[in-house]
């Protein structure tokens, strides 16, 4: 049947055309995302250009800000199933750097890291869950001073190149369960991590 309202027919036609275009663009963007993930898939070693920073706040003060100069690690990205990806990292607390040498000595002592008896801090993922187009939640086990406990970090994809990839990783860990509760509550029980992990494809 002929529609006597040509304006309405034109409007319906334009709406259909726009909807089809939007759907095609959405499908194309999804394909591009899948291609990017496939290109990033593989095994990587965490390289020396990374940075692993931490902070412990202090009541009425600046707290402690530091970093680890020595570390090693790797991660694997499964392009077909992100949940099958994995992360492993080892920190060497003897390499801790802070704003003052006396603070570094204190952190390395048996009051905190006890580097003489526990020269390594390790994290091993147990689950990786994609939370967005470029974000993931990483659950795992953090082991320090002989204590192994669940820990969680959030990761966001940064730059990607042909042979490497970068992640910005954040998380917060309570230190007292690891036998490092010295100074609380003047110093926060929470250690906040802010890391840039650069990976080179193996």
Image: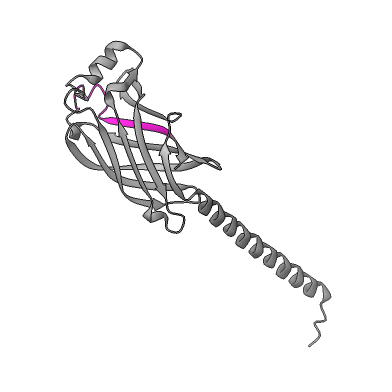
> Residue 7, image x and y in percent?
82, 72
Viewer-side residue, 28 vs 58: 28
Residue visible at 32% across and 24% down in the picture: 57
- Residue 5: image quadrant is bottom right
* 117 left or right of 163 in image: left
Per the image, is 184 magenta?
yes
Viewer-side residue, 71 vs 26: 71
Judge whether 72 appears above or below 5 on screen: above
- Residue 53: image quadrant is top left
Q: What residue span does the magenta drawing correspond to? A: 181-196
Residue visible at 71% across and 64% down in the picture: 18
For the C terminus, give its image quadrant.
Answer: top left
Residue pushed farthest front? 202
Judge whether 72 appears above or below 114 on screen: below
Residue visible at 46% across and 29% down in the picture: 49
> Residue 67, image x and y in percent?
36, 24
- Residue 119: image quadrant is top left
Q: Is residue 63 visible?
A: no
Per the image, is 189 magenta?
yes
Judge whether 99 appears above or below 123 on screen: above
For the N terminus, give its image quadrant.
Answer: bottom right
Viewer-side residue, 75 vs 150: 75
Residue visible at 17% across and 21% down in the picture: 111
* 148 left or right of 77 in image: left
* 164 left or right of 144 in image: right
């Amino acid at each position: 049947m002929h529609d006597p309202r040509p304006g309405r027919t034109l409007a319906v036609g334009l709406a259909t055309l726009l909807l089809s275009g939007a759907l095609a663009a959405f499908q194309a963007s999804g394909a591009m995302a899948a291609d990017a993930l496939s290109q990033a898939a593989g095994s990587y070693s965490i390289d020396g250009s990374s940075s692993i920073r931490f902070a412990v706040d202090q009541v009425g003060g600046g707290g402690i800000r530091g970093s680890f100069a020595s570390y090693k690690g790797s991660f694997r990205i499964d392009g077909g199933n992100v949940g099958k990806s994995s992360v492993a990292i080892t920190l060497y607390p003897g390499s801790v750097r802070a704003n003052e040498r006396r603070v570094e000595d204190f952190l390395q002592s048996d009051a905190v890291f006890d580097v003489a008896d526990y020269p390594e801090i390790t994290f091993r993922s147990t689950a990786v869950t994609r939370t967005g187009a470029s974000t993931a939640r990483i659950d795992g086990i953090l082991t320090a001073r002989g204590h192994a406990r669940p820990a969680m970090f959030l990761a966001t994809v940064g730059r990607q190149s042909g042979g490497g990839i970068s992640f910005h990783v954040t998380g917060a860990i309570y230190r007292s369960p690891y036998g490092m509760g010295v100074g609380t509550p003047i110093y926060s029980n929470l250690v906040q991590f802010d890391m840039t992990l650069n990976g080179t494809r193996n």
